[in-house]
Image (cartoon, grey):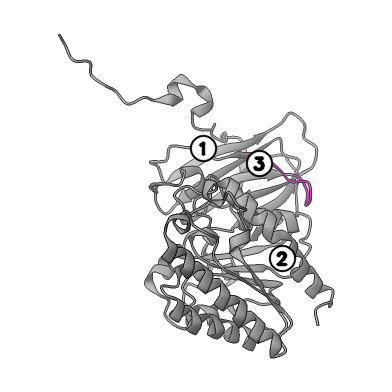
Amino acid sequence: MTQRQEKPIDVSKLDKAMAAGPAGGADLAWHRADEPPLRLAGFAWYAQDRLFRRLPAKPKEPLPPAVDELANCTAGGQVRFGTTSRRVAVRVKLRGPAGMVHMPATGQCGCDLYVGPPGAQVFCTTSTYNMRQSEYEVTLFQHADARPREFTLNFPLYQGVEELHVGLDADAEVSPPSPYALAGPIIFYGTSITQGGCACRPGMAHTNILSRKLNAEVINLGFSGNGRGEPELARIISEIADPALFVLEFDANVPSLELLKERLPAFIRILREQHGRTPILVVSRPPFAKDIHDPKALADRIARADFQRQAVEECRRAGDRRIEFCDGATLMGESFHECTVDGVHPTDLGFWRLAQSMEPVIRRLALSAVEGMLA
């Protein structure tokens, strides 16, 4: 009796919907991501360094090595534009191939595309490609009608991008996108959750969801495992001009409550030296599945949240009325344990709940600051 030789199942040959997306086509005109009237957003130091990088290439003081490397991941990057093109394609050269153990390649290394103006953006599709490769070209939009439309293209969350071009019909009109509702960006500083782990595609990270809901540029400074609140990071972040809001959600990466007690007040103080009137939202970490089974983990989360609440209250008693606290325990609801991949990192459901819960307070803080309504 011969033993049957098992072969890996190639689902793409069995289901065409699981195959890689179509290439763009040789007749497209390819536009650089920073080529006007396209608008590149999400990279605060791009004008200085001409790199798709989330921190300066040559900071004034040394970065922690892991942060320096993670800064090359392009979470929060966007290209926005209007066009009459019947097709929109993307051509990307990555710093390396996909390889994460619990995050899809479409989120780690892919781009996704939204169609429509602010307030009416509708998801189109994601770049599906051979995850073993570090370069790809994929058509993301096709339509028979050449009427004007607006598009938002989101960069990969967990990989670096060396080159990105947008492919459009050669005879298409290209125009600037609608302006943002806020003059300055909303700046998130935090952890792997902030960076977008483990969304299935870039547009489902809560920072990008909030960017769409609020029609605002978001600077994503989430550093996976390494958002630890170091003062040098606060000084670098404070270099960003005219921010609309700072969102600090780095609790989960700080190794101990004692260190959090040292770093959070210092971080706030450094930001305030440069941005005395910019609203600050301090967010404690969301609950992890471990908290259900481990009393020590639960007690630690509660103690951390209590400290952050008290730190914010102390700032307010001292006269800073532009700082608020958000309890992360409430953000994903009672079924938070069903909202993650591994008990920690959100699925798209988890990210959607985070964004839905955070939107009202972020909207109020960012817009009220613009309107001069904060005391």
Callout 2–callout 1 Cβ contact below 8 Å: no
Q: Secondary structure at mark 3?
A: strand
Q: Quadrant of the N terminus?
A: top left
**Residue 26 falls left or right of residue 160:** right
| Residue 119 among magenta residues | yes
Q: Which residue is mark 3?
A: 168
Q: Nearer the viewer, residue 342 or 298?
A: 298
* Above or below: residue 203 compared with residue 50: above
State the residue at coordinates (54%, 80%): 264
Q: Which mark is residue 128?
A: 1
Q: From the top left corner, tell me how far across and down residue 361 is, in percent.
A: 73, 65
Question: How far is mark 2 from mark 3, CA to CA?
Answer: 35 Å
Callout 3–callout 1 Cβ contact below 8 Å: no
Question: How far is mark 2 from mark 1, CA to CA?
Answer: 33 Å
Circle nearer the N terminus (2, 1): 1
Q: Amino acid at mark 1?
A: Thr
Residues packed near mark 2 inside 10 Å, few (<14), some (14 to 19) or many (20 plus):
many
| Camera sees residue 357 | yes
What are the residue bounds of the magenta stretch? Answer: 116-124
Q: Amino acid at mark 2?
A: Ile
Instruction: Identify the main secondary structure in magenta.
Output: loop
Q: Which residue is mark 2?
A: 362
Q: From the top left corner, tell me how far across and down residue 175 is, in percent.
A: 76, 51
Q: Quadrant of the C terminus?
A: bottom right
Residues packed near mark 3 inside 10 Å, few (<14), some (14 to 19) or many (20 plus):
many
